[in-house]
Amino acid sequence: MTLTDPPVSQGSPDYRDSGLVFPESFIFGSATASYQIEGAVDEDGRGPSIWDTFSHTPGLVWNGDTGDVAADHYHRLEEDLDLMVSLGLHAYRFSISWSRIQPTGRGPANEAGLDFYRRLIDGLLERDIRPIVTMYHWDLPQALEDEGGWTNRDTAYAFADYATILGEAFGDRVDTWTTLNEPWCSAYLGYGSGAHAPGRTDGAEALTAVHHLNLAHGLAILALKPLVTNNPNFSITLNLHVLRGEGETGPEAVRQIDALANRVFLGPLLKGEYPADVLEDTKAITDWAFVLPGDTEIIQQPLDVLGVNYYSTTLVRLWDGESDRQNADGHKDVGASPWPGADRVEFLAQPGPYTEMGWNIEPAGLEDLLVALHEEFPNQPLMVTENGAAFADEVVQTDDGPRVHDEARTDYLRRHFTAAHRAMARGVDLRGYQVWSLMDNFEWGYGYSKRFGIVHVDYDTLVRTPKDSARWYKQLVSTRTLP
């Protein structure tokens, strides 16, 4: 995927515009994920997931944190639904816990699990909020991991069976079905670097997982289509890497990482084929024999909208083999690499400012990404399905009650909504924007040390406090005009 050079800015050079008007059809919402907010991990028949196992393994998550309670959304559903109404959200993007529906990833549905999501979906519809369902946000049932997880082709077919259960239960009321969230993370961080569950460190397994996740996406859409009755959108969400090259070797480094990070998904999903160069780059790791005849035809299902998650950019060049190799790729470094076949690529630190995650803040990257996707796939509608920032937040007492003055997050959102608006002005068919995250939550390997929410969660009392960024967002949503 080739990023275009940005045009001369028509607004403020720092992307701090105001007064920009979004169209009436634009969908403003917010997003969460099941393991990050629900808690109630052993209630009402839910089985263990790989994240339960991973987070309970000493040394893998900061401070020994787990998702056992998280934000306790499972028990505070009505409160959280009313919170969404108070912010004026048009849509809510949430994920379903596979092991809450099928405790072992196979077999009949757990009715108590279906009931929870039925209450959630119906509660959203009653409040005129669109349900955007993510079927898989990284929490694979542990029983399936015990059988090989995403390295096992059968997992893709189990996912299709799971999709059938969801389609039969909710096929008349979901606005958008998103099959997978960020399969890059599931495959490369879960099976390559070991930074995410299940914590494996094998490049060949990571590439096998890439394909089986792609296959699961196609099989799930094929399973859902005969069951839905309300003409929903079908989608997948990718965390496409916005790559910059440095120096003479920059273009080659960009090509290699673009193949592994972006085109290995975009190719089969939107073109029906894997890129030849990624097969060549990784031939010493795997022969890709796990791709069977007919697989790419299954994967290439028409997408009503492509979900795009964006947080920061990535700067690369080829390593000289002598100096200390930089590894600032933005992902938690636990020793192994999430980049199979790209051993010569070096990831360089970038100028600040940074979020609490150490990610550089560059709203131009979002504009570049959206425009590049539009130019390569001009008929493909897009949606920003995650964008947001972690900062160190503090609740302060004021005459108006408790407040969180998160000016940095508000500024971050202003600049990225400006970038999205500029992309639309350049012809991008951008349907909406889901801010990450609705509330503070379990931030995977970082536990509760990073706060992304526009709503603060006190992890001792579980009290929710809308931050100043939430108040700003409410104004944007209600007026459709950037404050």
Image: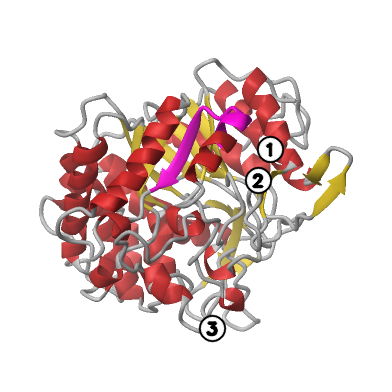
In the picture, residue 89 is in which quadrant? top right
- Which mark is first along the chain, 1 or 3? 3
Q: How is the image coloured?
A: secondary structure
| Residue at screen point 76% across, 56% down | 352
Label 1: element kind: helix
Label 3: element kind: loop
Q: Nearer the viewer, residue 283 or 25?
A: 25
Q: Is residue 480 visible?
A: no
Q: Nearer the viewer, residue 71 or 78?
A: 78
- Crowding around mark 2 (Cα neighbors within 10 Å: few <14, some 14 to 19, many 20+) is many
- Crowding around mark 1 (Cα neighbors within 10 Å: few <14, some 14 to 19, many 20+) is many
The magenta span reads 84-95
Disc 1 to disc 2: CB gap under 8 Å: yes
In the picture, residue 105 is in which quadrant? bottom left
For the residue marked with disc 3, what is the amino acid?
Gly
- x and y percentages locating residue 219 in the rendered image: 18, 48
Question: Does 328 sit left or right of 286 as displayed?
Answer: right
- Which mark is first along the chain, 3 or 2? 3
| Residue at screen point 45% across, 55% down | 258
Label 2: element kind: strand
Which residue is under mark 2? 455
Say whether residue 90 is magenta.
yes
- Which mark is first along the chain, 2 or 1? 2
Location of the N terminus (image quadrant): top left
> Which disc is residue 470 wearing?
1
For the residue marked with disc 1, what is the amino acid?
Ala
- Real-space Cα distance between discs 2 and 3? 29 Å
- Real-space Cα distance between discs 1 and 2? 7 Å
For the residue marked with disc 2, what is the amino acid?
Val
Question: Does 156 sit left or right of 359 as displayed?
Answer: left
Which residue is under mark 3? 59
| Residue at screen point 63% across, 35% down | 6
